[in-house]
Amino acid sequence: MKAQVAIEFMIIFGTFLIALSFVVLAAWNNIVNIDKSSIDFEANRILNLISNRINTVYLEGHGFSIGLAVQEKIGVYNYTIEIEENNLWLTVNEISYSRRLLTPNITGNIEKGTNTLENVNGEIVVS
């Protein structure tokens, strides 16, 4: 009788552990998805900010300048910003995001922190 109770307890406890494992895996999956979504959102927000400022400076013409403040990190992750011809690239956590710019005539690099964008005879100068 005692052995039967012990076996039944082990079966019920084992079933409970398996169910608990599935719940933990589902919760972990949701946390990972939320983290990725927040990184996607922030990366796209930064890309939109930078590309909109560059395009505005280009469209406003010679002599126009504007400031640009770029945050240091996306969440806890470092990221890089690169401009190749008329493409703006942001890479974070081994994932790349891009935006197309209106002009390939860009001198200088976008740095984290404060930048100044100026239109000098149709060329965008980043300082």
Image (spheres, helix red, strand yellow):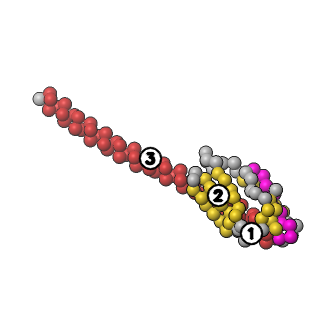
Question: Can you say which quadrant of the picture contains the C terminus?
Answer: bottom right
Instruction: Identify whether 48 is placed above or below 59.
Output: above
Q: Earlier in the sequence, mark 1 or mark 3?
A: 3
Q: Residue 28 carries which label?
A: 3
- The quarter of the picture where the N terminus appears is top left
Q: Main secondary structure of the magenta part?
A: strand
Q: Residues within 10 Å of mark 1 (few under 14, many from 20)?
A: some
Answer whether labels 1 and 2 touch (C-beta < 8 Å). no
Residue closest to the eye, 88 or 8: 88
Q: Nearer the viewer, residue 42 or 95?
A: 95
Q: Which residue is drawn at 19% across and 31% down?
A: 6
Q: Which of marks 1 and 2 is nearer the N terminus?
A: 2
Which of the pair 42/5 is nearer the observer?
Answer: 42
Q: Which amino acid does label 3 sit on?
A: Trp
Above-or-below relation of 85 to 94:
below
> Is residue 119 rendered to the left or right of residue 88?
right
Cβ atoms at labels 1 and 3 below 8 Å apart: no
Callout 2, which amino acid?
A: Leu
Confirm whether the magenta stretch covers residue 120.
yes
Q: What stretch is highlighted in magenta?
A: 113-122
Q: Which residue is drawn at the image coordinates 74% and 69% (left, top)?
A: 104
Q: Can you see residue 49? A: no
Looking at the image, which residue is at 49% across and 50% down?
32
Task: Name the residue carrying label 1.
Answer: 104
Classify residue 43 by image quadrant: bottom right
Which numbered disc covers residue 59? none
Which mark is first along the chain, 3 or 2?
Answer: 3
